[in-house]
Image: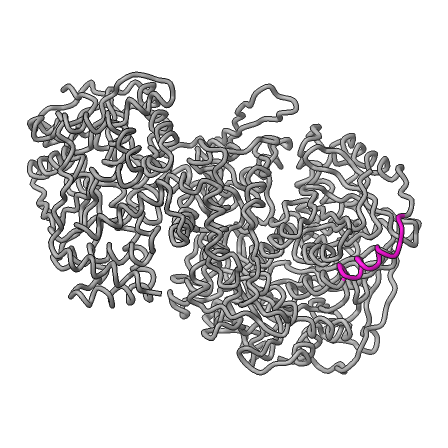
Amino acid sequence: MAKFAFYPGCAAKGASKELYESTVAVAEELGIELLELPQFSCCGAGVLEEIKDVMDIAVNARNLAYAEREGLNIVTVCSTCLLVLRKAKFHLDNDDELREGVNEILSRFGLRYEGKVEVKHFHWILLDELGEDGLRERVKRPLSGLKVYPYYGCHTVRPESVLGYEPSENPQSLERIIRALGAEVALGERRLECCGFHAFWPAPQLSMKLTGMNLKDAKISGADCIVTPCPLCHMNLDANQKRALKAIGESFQIPVLHLPQLVGIALGIDERRLGLQRNIVPVRC
Amino acid sequence: MEKREVTFRIFRFNPKRDEKPCYRDYKLPVPKGMTILEALQFIKDNLDPTLSFRAFCRSAICGSCAVKINGFPKLACKTQVLNEVEKFGTDILTVEPIDNFPVIRDLIVDWEPAIEKLREVYPYLIPDPEVVPHTLEEESRVYPGELKKFDIFTDCILCTSCYSACTAVKIDEEYGGPFQLARSYRFAVDPRDALKKERAKVGLAFNMWNCVRCEKCADVCPKHIAPVDGIMKLRGLSIEIGKRDNPGARHVMAFYKSLLESGMLNEVLLPLRTKGIKGIIENLPLGVMMILKGKAHSPIVKPIDEHETLVGVMKAAMEVE
Amino acid sequence: MLQYDIVIVGAGGGGLYAALETSKKKGLKVAVISKVFPTRSHTGAAQGGINAALGNVAPDSPEKHSYDTVKGSDFLADQDAVELMCETAPKIIREMEHMGLPFSRLEDGRIAQRPFGGASFPRTCYAADKTGHVMLQTLYEQCLKNNVTFLDEWFALSLVHNGERIAGIVAVDLKTGEVHGIRAKAVILATGGHARIYWKRTSNALGNTGDGPAMALRAGIPLKDMEFVQFHPTGLRRTGILVTEGARGEGGYLINNKGERFMKRYAPEKMELAPRDLVSRAIETEILEGRGFKDDEGNEFVYLDLRHLGRKKMLERLPQIRELAIDFEGVDPIEEPIPVRPTAHYSMGGIDTDIYGRTRIKGLYAVGECACVSVHGANRLGGNSLLDIVVFGKIAGEDAANYVSEVSFIPFEESRVRDEEERIESLFSGDGTERLADLRNELSDVMTYGAGIFREEKKMRETLEKVREIKERAKRLKIEDTERVFNTNLQQTLEFLNMVEVAETIVLGAIERKESRGAHFRLDYPKRDDENFLKHSIIEKGEDGDLRISWKPVKITKFQPEERKY
């Protein structure tokens, strides 16, 4: 099976450790080898661009360079890390002058970015490495009867020019996985809408309102739970659920799962290994 | 040549006359190569002369014909019908006016709210007398590297697609809007401009920190501009000119500090660093819950391996012109 | 009634420059009316560039620029006007540069210049391949800065004058459908070109329908050199959408079905960079003589091959062209040659003006493509149209601003508003036995047949008759959309009626000009005839409604007519 340089990102290494746990557990179960490089730094979540764009790109060129040195492609479980790393790569690959400048900096530390490394999301490699059939074959506990709301959020799909795994206006990767696990897809209107996470600090009300609207849409769609490939969306949808619903004058509970948690349940992995007990809104299997 | 039957489900509304909008279906054979605009014109010429939409250049440079196809704003003239059919896996395409604007009639909207905001962001060069010559015998010097910083943002055709897709505009009426803020940035880094980085203050006045970075503006722009990039850079300029006493700027600096300290974000300290004691109090219930659930980590984050290379790269990058 | 000192009709480069110039004069009340939001204007579609003898790349002078322009015009341009334009060019380029226009730059920071068809030096200033776009945006920005009043999406219907002085215009506010009189001491027409007459094969925007010349004609104001319509050599096969001359300037090849760079037979020295009329005829000849290509839909074409430029140069210098080819033709020019054919592009003829943009009626000005000063004569050089609009927009704006401070308003008869209301009313009550789309296509077909790239007496006579017949049949058109709010059906009908009127003048001029010159090429008179036709044709509508043709001498200063060889 394939081997990847694992880039968990700060959320999975920090306050969303259940994402780290479930990713590692699922990868192990499926025989996907994840090598976490201890030199990987935080990607800066895009905000480094607000200090200086070249620094943002240089920091991530450094991350890319470490993976290249190992000869491995990067896989991440955070949508924003995915976007930031891919954006850096996009600029480096399309701007010779920039790449030369950044490589000059990297060379002072014995590093170099060649452009060989690819950056992928964990759920993309599930589909690429196993496919829907492969995944279906591994399911030990089909999620039949479960209605799941596929919440993409933003940074796994937009902008398509940088992400490009699937059409940003009609992605289907999450739906394909949900169905392969034996669950049903809940059809909603806000699966591609923003959760507002990145405006949480400057504009908490705006952020909470957006999250509230998304939660409500999931509820209306009749979903039993929401699944998301992004720990930041998860933070808003799960940890901040109560506050978000209050912002739109609603009150209910809907479990929100990290994508590897949902996959892990279907693969029959023990709940503790998936960190389900850490989700703020209780998840009952 | 092979043709495919496609149904166009078109939004029809005349606010002067109709109580509420309705959708009307028009079915037509679509050959390969037909654009949405050609389809609309076909309907107008052959099926329903009352269908109202704007169009002018037909070549994606005038910005007249932005409409919403299956929920996403795009220029009718540069959108191939069969590509949309394939993308959405349907023979029915919904065509609607773009969002965030009052509808004048059918697919025609009133751009005024967005243009009004454009007018307010000083969307023009205010010449720097030190740089722009006083006589018409000379040109100002703008080096290719300087031009490169803002060139892409001058591609904007004011089609307002980004404004119609913008998440922040939908929630915050005061928000400046993607193309407007991107134009502010365009002038802020034009060496000929007198206001220069001070233009970031305009961004502050128009809530630029409320951009949620949903990347929709970057995705829908028919000219491949990413207004969000301009907004983030404009935020950067505000930090540069010392406008750091706000949660947005402090959040940025918290990241910067974390990276220099350990290479990873210190999420536990983020509320304190971003909003001070207020941040702690506001997020206290959540914090307690996270501790109980075992989500919180130690406030001391172990540095990554070879952290010194990160610090070195960051410092070197900060020195690049 | 609305009242302004100056009303400018049209918000392209010419209209906006005039507006900027008038806004410099304090206390004037000026409005720009435009049937589209200002930055939608067709100036934005000009890709390649704007000429000025800056000499940034190679030594150059306004005199050389003038000579190239006069020679390109096949000696029909008025040389005093050309000299004025070429002398003003460097200054006005710098003026726009000072406004923030993002010109492409040389390594030393000065404005970059590139070679263009018919020019003896790299003289064309540019902003990648979006020169007109950034010019339009920059001028609009400056108008916002100077608080210019805009009446967006107002459509001008007629000119009101007393036979001597202008009194104002009548226009319809498209958003409400209401007809208004607008009183003004001066009116500047900047309504753009009319190549949309060739509906099915033109690079023009849907609205380039000759509204200005048609209004002028109806108001008894003469049009000049209408027979000259430039066909741009490289329109995309299906739509006629333009592939800029910049593509050839950057080194593109034109290739026939034998794989030859056929321009070697027509312009051995300049090759693909020969003037537009020559290249257009060359392509048409290749196609007529069986050396073109033909697709399934019956479109005939040749190839514009850019592959040898390489990916990097293409992405840097011609990004928009690449995208156009992909979006509208399904061809990536990095990998495949682009199928092209000449497309109706530019109207050299227009409202007869002097070098200040003045017309026969005092206070009425015309600038840019709707006007004929004339600086382009029988054939316009690439990079001179953007120059024309800004130079004469500026001059006319300045002249008008001075003029209105010296005169008072004259009476504007309210009945003129009612006349237009009635004209519109009648369009709703036709018998409806004719359809707009059909008539538009027919007009396009007959004009392409009889007044296209190759012309001859018999075909032109047939075409003239057909155009008159279409004009008659147009009376039976019925506007089926009865709403007043944003009635695009009404607008398109009014535009069509303008086109038919203007089409007739093109054919008439073409019949009467029994020679070949520039864009006007007659198979039955294949030579230029300076003895009989070194003069401008003037067409106007008499009291009886019939068109009358007369002639006006060409102003020659420095450059004596010589054979035009490239």
At 84% from the left and 62% from the top, the residue drawn is: C538
At 58% from the left and 45% from the top, the residue drawn is: B119
Specify whether residue B221 is in view: yes
**Per the image, is C404 magenta?**
yes
Q: Height in image: A225 above or below B85?
A: above
Q: Would you say the magenta stretch is mainly helix, strand or loop? A: helix
Q: Quadrant of the C terminus of chain A?
A: top left
Seen from the viewer's position, the closer of residues A281 and C237 is: A281
Magenta span covers which residues? C396-409
Seen from the viewer's position, the closer of residues B28 and C131 is: C131
x and y percent of residue C88 in the render?
69, 71
x and y percent of residue B296 in the render?
16, 33
Q: What colouring method underlies this structural image?
A: one colour
x and y percent of residue C356 in the render?
79, 64
**Residue situated furthest front in the rendering:** B277
Q: Height in image: C303 above or below A35?
A: below
x and y percent of residue C193 in the render?
69, 56
**Per the image, is B269 magenta?**
no
